[in-house]
Amino acid sequence: MTMPLDAHDDVPDEVLLVLFANGDGAAARVLTLRLTPRVVAHAYRLLGNRAEAEDVAQEAMLRLWKQARDWRPGEAKVTTWLYRVVANLCIDRQRRARGGSVALDAIPEPADGRATVDQAMQERARAEALQAALNDLPERQRQAVVLRHIEGLANPEIAGIMEITIEAVESLTSRGKRALSAALAGRQEELGYVDER
Amino acid sequence: MSMSGKQRTDDGLDGFFEAARGYAPAHSPDLLARVLADAEATQQAGPGTEPAGVPATRDGFVAHLYRLLGGWPAMAGLATAALTGIWIGTALPEGLIGTAEAAYLVDITPEMAFDLAGGDF
C-alpha cells in the first residue's frame, strides 16, 4: 500500500526506508527528492566535478535501494551511511583517475535567486575559490573539512562516517583548514573580504 | 551573504564555507528521474532477487548431491580416486608382475590376468 506523498514529509529517513522495502512508491519518491540533492552536493564537494558527482550520487542511491531490505534500524542514520558510501565511491574514482583535471566550469549556478547579481557573482567566486583549494587537499582532510564545515556535522558523526577517532577528525580538520587558509590568504581582498580589526 | 562589515574569524574561512553552502550543485534535470527509476526497478525486482553480479543459488538434484557430498573438496578427492583407479587398471607395467601376482590378479581383475597369460583362455 502506498501512502500519499505529503503524508511522508515529517517521516524520518529510516522509517521511509522500511516503507520503501515494503513496496511503498511514495516513500521511494520522498527519499529520492530528500536525499539525492544532499548526496550529489556532497559528492561534488569531494570531487569538484558535477558530472562525476551525479554518477556517484546515482550509484550511492542505488546501493541504498538495494540495502533497504537488510537495513537494521537504529544502527546508523541513513545520511551517515550515505556519506560513507559517497566518500568511498569518490575515493575510488579519484584513485582510478589520479591526476585528472578539475572542471571549474562545472561549478553550479547559484541556488539562491534573492541575492543581487553582484553579491551572487562574489559568492560564486568565493565558492569556486574554496572548491579549487579543497581539490588540492589530501582526500581525507578534504572529506573531514567538508563534513564539518560545509555539511555541518558534529565530530562524533564524522568519526563514525570516516571510521576514525574523534581526535583524528579534529586533527584532519585542523590541518585541512590550515592548508585552506594558506591557499586562500592571498585572495581575501580580491574576493571582497575586508579586515576591520 | 557578504562578509564585508563583519569581523573575520581567525582563519578567515567562514565566509568561504558560507558561500559554498549557498552553492548547492544544481544537478541535471534527469538525475532525479534516473534515481527514481532505479528505486522502482529495485522495488519491482522483489525480495527474492539477488543484486546484480551475485550468482543465483544452485538448484536441482545434481546441485543437491554436490552439496550432500561435501562440495568441491570432496568432489576433488573422488575425482582423484577415480582417475587413480583407471590408471592402475590400464597402465600397470607388465614387467612388474610375476606369475604369483598374476594369479592373484585373477581374483580382482580377471581381464588383466587374461591379457598377461597371452589371451589363450
Image (spheres, rainbow, N blue to C red):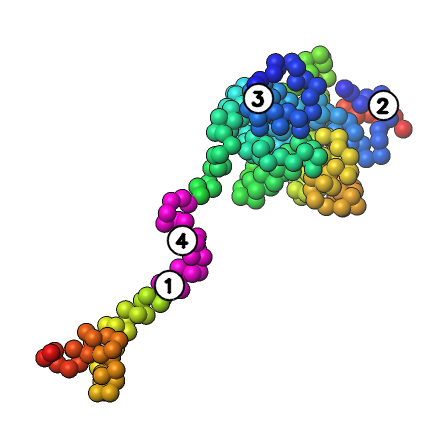
Task: Assess whether mark 4 and mark 3 are in contact (beta carbons under 8 angstroms).
Answer: no
| Chain ID at mark 3 | A
What residue is pinned by disc 1?
B78
What residue is pinned by disc 2?
B6
Most foreground residue, B31 or A126 = B31
Mark 3 surroundings: few (<14), some (14-19) or many (≥20) residues within 10 A: some
Numbered tag placed on residue A146 in the rendering:
none
x, y percent for residue A185:
76, 35
Residue occupying image coordinates x 24% and y 75%:
B109
Q: Are marks 4 and 2 on the same chain?
A: yes
Amino acid type of the residue tagged 3 in the rendering: Asp
Specify start and end residues of the magenta stretch as a single range: B58-79
Badge nearest the viewer, 2 or 3: 3
Residue occupying image coordinates x 21% and y 87%:
B99
Horizontally, is B100 left or right of A100 in the view? left
Label 2 and label 3: CA atoms lie apart by 49 Å
What residue is pinned by disc 4?
B66
Q: Quadrant of residue A195?
A: top right
Amino acid type of the residue tagged 2 in the rendering: Lys
Residue occupying image coordinates x 22% and y 79%:
B106
x, y percent for residue A46:
64, 35
Horizontally, is A17 left or right of A191 in the view? left
What residue is pinned by disc 3?
A24
Quadrant of the drawing holding the C terminus of chain A:
top right
In this view, A196 is above or below A95:
above
Mark earlier in primary sequence (4, 2): 2
Amino acid type of the residue tagged 1 in the rendering: Leu
Badge nearest the viewer, 3 or 4: 4
